[in-house]
Image (cartoon, rainbow, N blue to C red):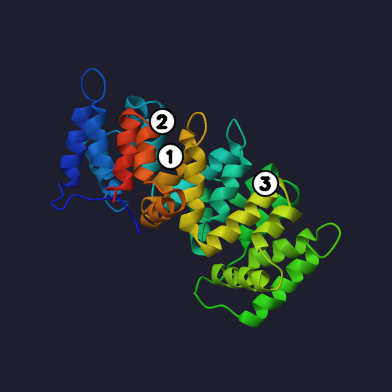
């Protein structure tokens, strides 16, 4: 469930474009107006505002936002202006071909998305950047992580809620044999099962494993390491409960000294129109406090106002 709140009586896209243009005029930018408008427009409305702006002022709204804003608020707003697939494609391209290669971010995005989301992202990635996502993974990743990511983006998994218990038990046995039962680890088996099974089926595998041998999550932690371990755990946790997975990612971004604003932006902006309501509920359940309150205390200024607008009211 999304958390983006659109006003009940909506102004026209033309009025929004006029207000934005007015906010850019003069000395400095009226960022409060920019936040108040864009944080409360959904993915169907934002492209219309962009189109109206271009028609009226013969300039690209994203280019103007890029000139007028800076720092965290600029990154958050520009990412928000895309539709969900465009956002993921933008994050992945930066992670796989930017100044600093960030395989952890690429892994999080790929391994937490549904098969249909991944198919869409692959198409948009090629349309936006003239490159294939698989090629960039091939070029930047290596070893077992590369094999898993390529298998994961290349396999059309079923998305329905049904699962096969017998098959799940067989997979659980195969994983036990490939990991905890033997000296060393047969990574190929982990890659095959984790990349080929649907979310519901992998949840059934985890449950079967638990009944027979104990925690599959613990087995993955014991048998693998680094980004490969993170990829397997992301797939597993998102198969079982994506809200809980992202609640943990957000909590980790805000705990300790300093806040990881990039992670905060990535998760809140990409999930606000998908399942942020569930993430907020899981956050409250797991950490005993509200996500809105933590974001409020860990951020400041327009950046804080923008993220809190995307999160919707605190319950």
Q: Earlier in the sequence, mark 1 or mark 2?
A: 2
Q: Which residue is mark 2?
A: 72
Using the image, determine if residue 244 lies above or below residue 240: above
Residue appearing at x 47%, y 32% in the figure: 259
For residue 180, which quarter of the picture? bottom right
Q: Which residue is mark 3?
A: 227
Using the image, determine if residue 27 lies above or below residue 262: above
> Position of 32 compared to 128: left or right?
left
Q: Earlier in the sequence, mark 1 or mark 3?
A: 3
> Position of 63 compared to 254: left or right?
left
Tag 3 and tag 2, C-beta contact below 8 Å: no
For residue 218, which quarter of the picture? bottom right
| Image coords of residue 12 (percent x, y) | 16, 47
Tag 1 and tag 2, C-beta contact below 8 Å: yes
Q: Earlier in the sequence, mark 3 or mark 2?
A: 2
Residue appearing at x 68%, y 42% in the figure: 140
Task: Say few, some or many: other residues with alpha carbon within 10 Å of mark 1 (under 14 / 14 to 19 / 20 or more).
Answer: many
For residue 189, which quarter of the picture? bottom right
Q: Who is closer to the viewer here, 314 or 32?
A: 314
| Label annotation for residue 265 | 1
């Amino acid at each position: 469930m999304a958390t983006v709140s659109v006003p009940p009586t909506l102004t026209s896209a033309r009025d929004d474009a006029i207000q934005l243009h007015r906010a850019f005029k003069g000395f400095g930018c009226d960022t409060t107006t920019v936040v108040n408008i864009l944080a409360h427009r959904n993915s169907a409305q934002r492209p219309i505002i962009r189109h109206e702006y271009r028609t009226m002022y013969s300039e690209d709204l994203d280019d103007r936002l890029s000139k007028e804003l800076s720092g965290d608020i600029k990154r958050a707003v520009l990412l928000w202006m895309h539709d969900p697939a465009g956002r993921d494609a933008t994050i992945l391209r930066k992670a796989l071909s930017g100044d600093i290669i960030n395989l952890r971010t690429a892994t999080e995005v790929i391994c937490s998305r549904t098969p249909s989301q991944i198919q869409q992202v692959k198409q948009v990635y090629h349309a936006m950047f003239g490159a294939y996502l698989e090629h960039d993974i091939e070029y930047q990743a290596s070893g077992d992580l590369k094999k898993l990511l390529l298998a994961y983006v290349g396999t059309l998994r079923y998305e329905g809620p049904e699962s096969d218990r017998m098959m799940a038990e067989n997979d659980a046995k195969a994983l036990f044999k490939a990991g905890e039962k033997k000296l060393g680890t047969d990574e190929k088996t982990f890659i095959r099962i984790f990349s080929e099974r649907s979310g519901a089926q992998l949840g059934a595998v985890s449950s079967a494993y638990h009944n027979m041998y104990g925690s599959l999550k613990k087995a993955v932690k014991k048998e693998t390491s680094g980004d490969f371990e993170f990829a397997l755990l992301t797939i597993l946790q998102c198969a079982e409960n994506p809200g809980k997975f992202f609640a943990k990612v957000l909590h980790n971004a805000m705990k300790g000294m300093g806040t990881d604003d990039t992670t905060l932006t990535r998760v809140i902006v990409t999930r606000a129109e998908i399942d942020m309501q569930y993430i907020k509920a899981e956050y409250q359940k797991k950490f005993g406090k509200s996500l809105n309150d933590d974001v409020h205390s860990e951020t400041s200024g327009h950046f804080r106002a923008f993220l809190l607008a995307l999160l919707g009211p605190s319950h």
